[in-house]
Image (cartoon, rainbow, N blue to C red):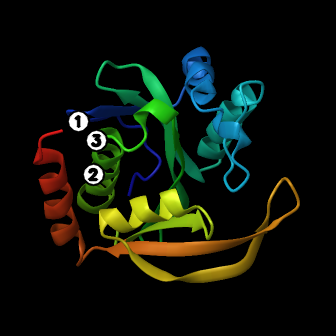
Amino acid sequence: MAFLEPVTLKGRHARLVPLSLDHHDALVEAVRDGELWKLWYTLIPSPEGMRGEIQRRLKLQDEGRMLPFTVLNADKVPVGMTTYMNIDVPNRRLEIGSTWYRASAQRTALNTQCKLMLLTHAFEDLDCIAVEFRSHVLNSQSRKGIERLGAKQDGILRRHMIQPNGTLRDTVVYSITAEEWPMVKSHLDWQLSKPR
């Protein structure tokens, strides 16, 4: 399986393209919309840290551990980042994560479109048997979004990570299995067909 082969995924409300340092300036502008790096319960790069974060993700891609994307809106303007990560080729599993969108793009069809494209590629092109999502237990916005996708909670990893501010993170783990995918896909298609 070519899990880490860069690919462009296109939809009506969004496009996912391979992450590049060429996107740096637009991503800095995007992260300033809502000052996202100030959210204590998630890890989003600051404007000053954006170049380093892009380089970190690209290095992980070179090591075979991540496939990072830049998220473009319908006007093809960069509005955030997302990745395939925690890739487990022998067990045909991966996680969709390290996702963030500028504040003005949140709670729009863009997120639903991105998740539909990523899940379709994972299940239908990469033949995954399960796709995972993780969130800080206190990140209610992220958890609600994951649950709206149709993912089921697998459990909570208590004291899973030490955050940069020194707090301990409990991580909620969700997944969608290959057997659940047709129902989830129908639900996401229906959500995107509703008038906005």
Would residue 162 appear left or right of 125 to someone viewing this image?
A: right
- Give the amino acid type for the residue marked by disc 1 in the picture: Gly
CB atoms of marks 3 and 2 within 8 Å: no
- Give the amino acid type for the residue marked by disc 2 in the picture: Leu
Residue denoted by label 1: 11
Q: Residue at x 57, y 64 (%)?
A: 135
Q: Circle 1 sits in a helix, a strand or a loop, which is it? A: loop
Q: Which mark is residue 116?
A: 2
Q: Circle 2 sits in a helix, a strand or a loop, which is it? A: helix
Q: Which mark is residue 138?
A: none
Question: What is the residue that sits farthest to the right in this orientation?
Answer: 166
Dot 1 alpha-carbon crowd within 10 angstroms: few under 14, some 14 to 19, many 20 or more: some
Q: Residue at x 17, y 47 (%)?
A: 192
CB atoms of marks 3 and 1 within 8 Å: no
CB atoms of marks 2 and 1 within 8 Å: yes
Q: CA distance from mark 3 to mark 1?
A: 11 Å
Nearest-to-viewer mark from 3 and 1 = 3
Q: Quick check: can you spot residue 91?
A: no
Q: CA distance from mark 2 to mark 1?
A: 9 Å
The earlier-in-sequence mark between 2 and 1 is 1
Q: Quadrant of residue 5?
A: top left
State which quarter of the image contains the N terminus. Answer: bottom left
The earlier-in-sequence mark between 3 and 1 is 1
- Give the amino acid type for the residue marked by disc 3 in the picture: Ala
Residue denoted by label 3: 109
Would residue 26 appear left or right of 1 to someone viewing this image?
A: right
x then y, percent, for residue 41: 69, 56
Would residue 158 appear left or right of 140 to someone viewing this image?
A: right
Q: Say if 103 sits above or below 191 in the image.
A: above
